[in-house]
Amino acid sequence: MSALLGRLATRAAGSTQVVLLSTLAAPLLLAAPSLLAAPSIAGAEVGTQAPFTRVVIDAGHGGKDEGAIGVNGILEKNLVLDVSERLTQLLQAEKLMVILTREKDRFVPLEVRTSRANDARGDLFVSIHANAAKSRKARGIETYFVSLEASDSASSLVAERENQALGSSGPAALAQDPFLALLGDMISTDHMADSNAFAKLAQAELAQIVEESSRGVKQAPFVVLMGVQMPAALIEIGFLSNKEDASSLRNKAHRQQIAEALARAVVAFGKRYDARRGLDSLAD
Ligand SMILES: [Zn+2]
């Protein structure tokens, strides 16, 4: 058992999870869903697999995991839940089904988020976070899709911070850990192109509201995105360590704009997804 797997086993609260964790890593993510609580589904009832219908929204952190703390006192866990709720409403208005990995201020382990998304057979996974950096000058919005190698050192640090809920000790441990290497094998190349496509759509929409501080699409080893069996991206909606960003994020209208930008990206992605398979989009 790898060190990380050991830590996971230590953290697992239920005995059923410990049993799974003592076997291979893959069953943790692929078989665990049936043993976990059903995902909370808002909107229409579970229907057919096609066309593009199900969007999993993952509000980062929650409960004892507060995430980044803003220079103005905003907590990442509350901020991203608010934006996730706004996005949920907008997507439901587009007749899309939304599956939330958490609805309240609750701690949900990263591997459980992944399981819930797979269990719900989502068509797209959108994880929402807010950034923090040592330099208080760093600001802006960036979108990630998963890879084992970070696209640059700053991206590596972002993944390191966001992976803390798993108890990982940083990118070095991530790169060397056999459990993570196994997770890496589970990154589907089929979904890589779609994940990149959605990330580009999302970042292009977000860039329209934060023109001067769009930081582009990047790649990094985010645990929550690994093992997700669908196109997936993680959005960092601004730096809570930056005064201007933290101030904007405190503003409801700004949070609504972010949600609207993400909703436009999801709808556009869904249309492409359906068009490629020769289906009429529900979002038309
Ligand atoms: Zn976060």
Image (spheres, helix red, strand yellow):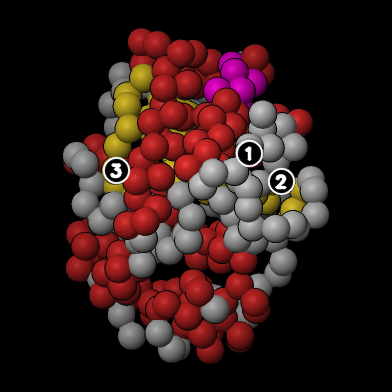
In the picture, which quadrant includes the N terminus? Answer: bottom left
Q: How far across and how far down the image is residue 281, in percent?
A: 63, 37
Q: Amino acid at mark 3?
A: Gln
Q: Which marked residue is nearer to the observer: mark 3 or mark 2? A: 2
Q: Quadrant of residue 187?
A: bottom left
Q: How far across and how far down the image is residue 38, in percent?
A: 72, 66
Q: Which marked residue is nearer to the observer: mark 1 or mark 2? A: 1
Q: Which residues are magenta?
A: 254-262
* Picture residue at 49% right of the left edge, 72% below the top: 29
Name the residue nearer the viewer: 202 or 161. 202
- Count residues near mark 1 (Cα–Cα under 10 Å), then give few for <14, some for 14-19, many for 20+: some
* Picture residue at 50% right of the left edge, 74% below the top: 30
Q: Which residue is mark 2?
A: 97
Q: Element at badge 2?
A: strand
Q: How far across and how far down the image is residue 119, in percent?
A: 62, 66
Q: Which residue is mark 1?
A: 280
Q: Element at badge 3?
A: strand
